[in-house]
Amino acid sequence: IGVHYKGLIFTSPRCVQSLKKAVESCDRESQWESYLKGCWIDKRMFCVGPSTFSEVLNFFSHSTSQQKDKIFVSQQGNSASLGQTIMTEALHQSISLPLLYPCGNLKTDTLGSLLQEKNIPFKTFVVYKTVKSEELERNPEASAAASPHMESNIYVFFSPSGVTFALPLLKDLESVKFIAIGPTTRAALENIPSISKENIYQCETPTPEALLTVLRTLVGKQDEK
């Protein structure tokens, strides 16, 4: 199958993990290690951020510097930045065959639209499905670590689907501060009429360090009151 594609696009660690599970469940004759992995490892791979990059290294076992040089990581850790990374590489080396793009069922159209505008061929296929947690629906306040005795709360969202599934179950959001891991999640929060845009914050990059920086800022503001 590798001969039909120029490379792979990974927009989250979960995409890599889901692909790995699919391979492990179907690979009864160990064809992945003996043959199939070799068809992919020398192809270009585009990762949305450092966590996804780590998953790719773990799954494909890139061992040489030449192989690792074919892995490209976006600077800002979001779909728009990843699209720019792919387009920049396409200027240096033509992408004639399509890029294989494993994704979730709730993916946004941001990346696909950017690639289509630049006539970069790609093919998507769904490798995982995002569903609402049953525990969240049974006990939303406990799941969100909310407490009516707290003077103010901070909610952190890592995806637009988290906003979609969790917010309808939460109450008393006037004093809540919201942190979005990236611009797509921030846009989902801004589309909620009951949330003031002044209460929405975004991480500079989708990393634990950037999240900690925002949390420290918000906690510092609370301590000043």
Image: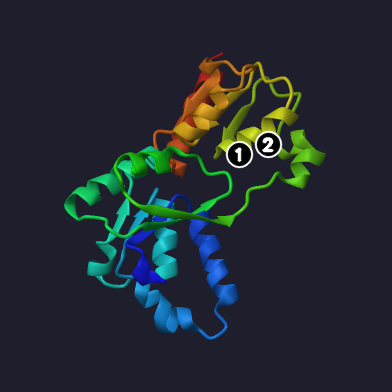
Image-quadrant location for residue 33 = bottom left
Q: Which residue is drawn at 27% across and 58% down?
A: 96
Residue corresponding to mark 1: 161
Residue 30 % position (x, y): 50, 84
Element under label 2?
helix
Residue 186 % position (x, y): 50, 29
Element under label 1?
helix
Quarter of the figure with the N terminus: bottom left
Residue type at tag 2: Phe
Q: Is residue 94 left or right of residue 39?
A: left
Q: Which mark is residue 165?
A: 2
Q: Are marks 1 and 2 in contact (CB under 8 Å)?
A: yes
Q: In this view, does 168 lie to the left or right of 44?
A: right
Q: How is the image coloured?
A: rainbow
Residue 57 % position (x, y): 39, 65
Return the residue nearer the eye: 94 or 169. Answer: 94
Q: Residue at x 31, y 66 (%)?
A: 43
**Badge 1: residue crowd in 10 Å (few <14, some 14–19, many ≥20):** some
**In the image, residue 23 above or below residue 223:** below
Residue pushed farthest top?
225
Residue type at tag 1: Ser
For residue 167, say whether it is visible: yes
**In the image, residue 71 above or below residue 11:** below
Q: Which residue is drawn at 39% across and 53% down?
A: 122
Q: Is residue 101 left or right of residue 160?
A: left
Q: Residue 128 carries which label?
A: none
Q: In this view, does 18 lie to the left or right of 208?
A: right
Quarter of the figure with the C terminus: top right
For residue 40, say whether it is visible: no
Residue pushed farthest left?
92
Q: Which residue is drawn at 77% across and 45% down?
A: 135
